[in-house]
Image: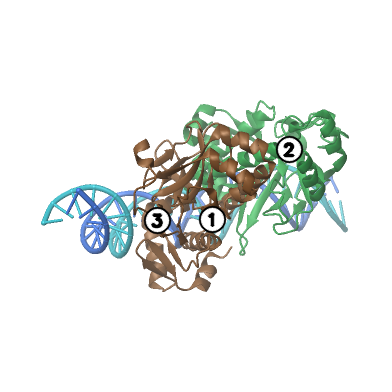
Chain colours: A green, B brown, C cyan, D blue
Amino acid sequence: MADLNDVDATGSPCSGEARVLGQTRCRAAQAASCDSCGVKDVSVCSALEAVELEAFNALSEKVIFRSKETLFLQGDDARAVYNVTCGTLRLYKLLPDGRRQIVGFLLPGDFVGLSLSERYGFSADAIDQVSACRFDRGDFIDFVDRNPHLLRRLHQAATHELTLAQDHMVLLGRRAAEEKVAAFLLAMRGRLRRLGGSAVTIPLAMTRQDLADHLGLTLETVSRVVSKLAREKTILVVPDGLRIMDAGRLEQIGAS
Amino acid sequence: MADLNDVDATGSPCSGEARVLGQTRCRAAQAASCDSCGVKDVSVCSALEAVELEAFNALSEKVIFRSKETLFLQGDDARAVYNVTCGTLRLYKLLPDGRRQIVGFLLPGDFVGLSLSERYGFSADAIDQVSACRFDRGDFIDFVDRNPHLLRRLHQAATHELTLAQDHMVLLGRRAAEEKVAAFLLAMRGRLRRLGGSAVTIPLAMTRQDLADHLGLTLETVSRVVSKLAREKTILVVPDGLRIMDAGRLEQIGAS
DNA sequence: CGGAGTATTGATTCACATCAACCTAAGTGG
DNA sequence: CCACTTAGGTTGATGTGAATCAATACTCCG
């Protein structure tokens, strides 16, 4: 597991030691203050001035979730919102019979609870170890009311999410299995790049089942498609990740 | 282009005559002012006080689109945002080879252009005749900057859209054809109810192909499912719509 | 009346799901 | 340190729901 991600042997993930996760250095993810936060430039906090940021920081509590730990379930009342600083979350909805749709994976810099609504509209689990800034929802809303910048930024983030969701609808409704996997890898590469990684190797903390539940497939189909792409040297399967060997080919398959 | 936007074709739908559309009376949809607007209580405008509403109204221009007319295409630069007062729009994305995913249908009270971004992220067509309030995007953004209420309301609308999008991902990724159709009808009934209709009869301005492109099916499959539900007396096929005869059964099929 | 667009229905095919066997790596505990 | 377990992954054989291909019907409109 950790073998491919560890940059320094001693540190546990998300502990303030340098570490590659999602192709992103998580150095100082558990920074005591926002100043040294690794995601301050990509996250919603970037809307805040130094002074505001200090007040904001005072509202937050640093929390860590272990792999597979549940942050909250769909329908729970929304006590908190979170800003992910390190690790990967899955957000999902379940049908009564247990079928699952993962509506998104969250990476460092992503915000959980954009809707600010009273109840969570989906469930959230940590896939690997996750660190996050936790805010009491009431405090957060009060802060937003006093800082219009932040509302602008939240709205921007929400509409960005909406755009991603719409793109994902195209994928789910109109693409074949191979296209789904290719498009997913390209989308993930894009996100990782924006987080500062070179992103030829896509670290995948999630299982084949997670991928399947995100892409509207079964785990066997995901496995078969991955094997096929690897056989054709479009990608290379590495422990806990995939390396893109032929991006052109991938784009040809997953063209949008 | 401008030819089709003239407001007063007497007797046409959306012209101030009472007319059932989406189970919603569109009386006075083309009201000269917001006071008499049929959707003022359900739309984003509801966030505004009388005084603000007056200024808002001054920014808007009433426009009409004929059936099948295109409002804008994905990638166009976003000159305007719209508030639908009457009729039905389809919002969609196309893949290079022509496959289409309809990401949503907009009904009276719905807002087009929530993201306020510089380019449209999807294309939009009028399905039947549509009236809308059109705002210059720049003017609208300025107005929003001066009226924080409105930003709150827009953010709320955006996160509501996001929730709908996530629900639709579940439908597209994890539901069988019959469940898709049932869930769609129930969702549509819910929206129409919120617009004030009794909504046992669901008027469907869109074709089977539109439905298919929204539900991730083919038009034949939609037709077969509708026929099957009709054969079982769960629904009744009526001209330009479907009447729900056995809501319990429909909920059993489309349970979420 | 004729034609275009839309809808229905049937026959057939196929992409992906399902069912099942087996493999590997990483614990866990005696 | 090794037997055993568990979770994840791969691969093969078979089944099936929806797509595709195709024919026909309906409805509106000029």
The residue singled out by tag 2 in the image is A148
Left or right of A26, for residue B189: left
Mark 1 vs mark 2, CA separation in Å: 35 Å
Q: Earlier in the sequence, mark 3 or mark 1?
A: 1
Q: Nearer the viewer, mark 2 or mark 3?
A: 2
Q: Chain letter of disc 3? A: B
Q: Is residue B172 or residue B192 the one in the foreground?
A: B192
Within 10 Å of the Cα at label 1, are there few (<14), some (14-19), or many (20+) other Cα atoms?
many
Please provide percent x and percent y for residue D18. Answer: 43, 56
In the structure shown, which secondary structural element does the residue marked by tag 2 occupy? helix
Q: Quadrant of residue B97?
A: top left
| Disc 2 residue type (three-letter) | Pro
| Disc 3 residue type (three-letter) | Ala
The residue singled out by tag 1 in the image is B171
The residue singled out by tag 3 in the image is B205
Q: Are marks 2 and 3 on the same chain?
A: no
Within 10 Å of the Cα at label 2, are there few (<14), some (14-19), or many (20+) other Cα atoms?
some
Residue depicted at x 58% and y 44%? B54
In the structure shown, which secondary structural element does the residue marked by tag 1 occupy? helix
Please provide percent x and percent y for residue A87. Answer: 75, 40
Q: Chain letter of disc 1? A: B
Q: Is residue A211 or residue B133 the one in the foreground?
A: B133
Residue A32 against residue D25 in the figure, above or below: above
Q: Chain letter of disc 2? A: A
Please provide percent x and percent y for residue A145. Answer: 76, 43
Residue A37 disc label: none
Mark 2 vs mark 3, CA separation in Å: 40 Å
